[in-house]
Image: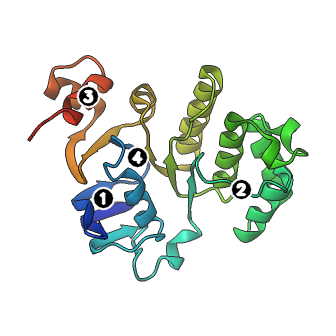
């Protein structure tokens, strides 16, 4: 089976600081994978390179069979990205923001698609409000709606349920699983929420100091480290001295 995401010997150096040091991993069609690691481990850098926003120092990245360094425009229309840390224009309403992005993504029947996502993500009452007036949790849901407008085959997510209350977060996780099941999309998420990763991900890659420190299914990692939760595994890896 051909990987949807294929990262090989990825290296990124910023002003002499090594952010990624030979990272390699694969994500196959329809998988939901987690990319974990502490602050500065390289998660955000990896996602940025996958999107073609950053150029690697060396190594290769292919998404949907496309070399993201040389021909990313061939894949970007079939991908999307969500992060609560990337703001949308504050003076536009939620509807206006989503409509702008729907036009940029060349979404057919864009008004219908916006209404559909607003219903699924509980945004209907927010469509007329200015984005800048929203709470952090509301902005997180709008960002996810933006990322789903073009029904992406590959969805990259950075902390997809940040700032959401437990009920809203669980609804979003359920929606993402339904979206993956119904569309066959491939999802890669970076998260510090270990319970979320256990709930969503069939495979996990844990970064430490710019390298893959562990990989496997959640069950495999629990057995390998003799732990009961993924959070305990994460802490064990983060505290390794070697």
The nearer-to-camera label among 2 and 1 is 2
* Secondary structure at numbered mark 1: loop
Query: Looking at the image, which residue sits at the far left?
Result: 242
Dot 3, crowdedness within 10 Å: few (<14), some or many (≥20)? Answer: few
Q: CA distance from mark 4 to mark 2?
A: 29 Å
Q: Quadrant of residue 210?
A: bottom left
Left or right: where 117 falls relative to 82: right
* Marks 4 and 1, the one that precedes in the sequence: 1
Q: Please tell me whether residue 232 is drawn above or below residue 54 in the rendered image.
A: above
* Residue nearest the observer in this picture, 73 or 209: 209
* Secondary structure at numbered mark 3: helix
Q: Residue at x 56, y 35 (%)?
A: 162
* Marks 4 and 2, the one that precedes in the sequence: 4
Q: Position of residue 226 (x, y in %)?
A: 15, 20
**Residue tagged 3:** 235
* Marks 3 and 2, the one that precedes in the sequence: 2
């Amino acid at each position: 089976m051909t990987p949807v995401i294929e990262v090989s010997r990825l290296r990124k150096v910023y002003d002499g600081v090594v952010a990624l040091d030979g990272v390699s991993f694969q994500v196959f069609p329809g998988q939901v994978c987690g990319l974990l690691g502490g602050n500065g481990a390289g998660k955000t850098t990896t996602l940025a390179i996958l999107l073609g926003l950053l150029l690697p120092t060396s190594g290769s990245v292919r998404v949907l069979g496309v070399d993201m360094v040389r021909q990313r425009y061939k894949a970007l229309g079939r991908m999307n990205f969500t992060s609560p840390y990337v703001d949308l224009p504050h003076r536009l309403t939620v509807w206006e923001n989503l409509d702008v992005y729907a036009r940029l993504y060349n979404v057919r029947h864009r008004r219908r698609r916006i209404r559909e996502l607003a219903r699924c993500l509980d945004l209907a009452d927010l469509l007329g409000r200015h984005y800048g007036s929203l709470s952090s949790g509301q902005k997180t849901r709008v960002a996810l709606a933006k990322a789903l407008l073009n029904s992406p085959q590959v969805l990259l997510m950075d902390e997809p349920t940040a700032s959401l209350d437990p009920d809203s977060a669980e609804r979003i996780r359920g929606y993402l699983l339904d979206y993956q099941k119904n569309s066959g999309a491939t999802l890669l998420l970076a998260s510090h929420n270990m319970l979320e990763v256990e709930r969503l991900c069939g495979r996990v890659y844990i970064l430490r100091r710019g390298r893959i420190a562990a990989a496997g299914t959640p069950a495999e990692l629990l057995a390998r480290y003799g732990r009961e939760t993924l959070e305990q595994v994460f802490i064990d890896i983060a505290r390794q001295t070697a």
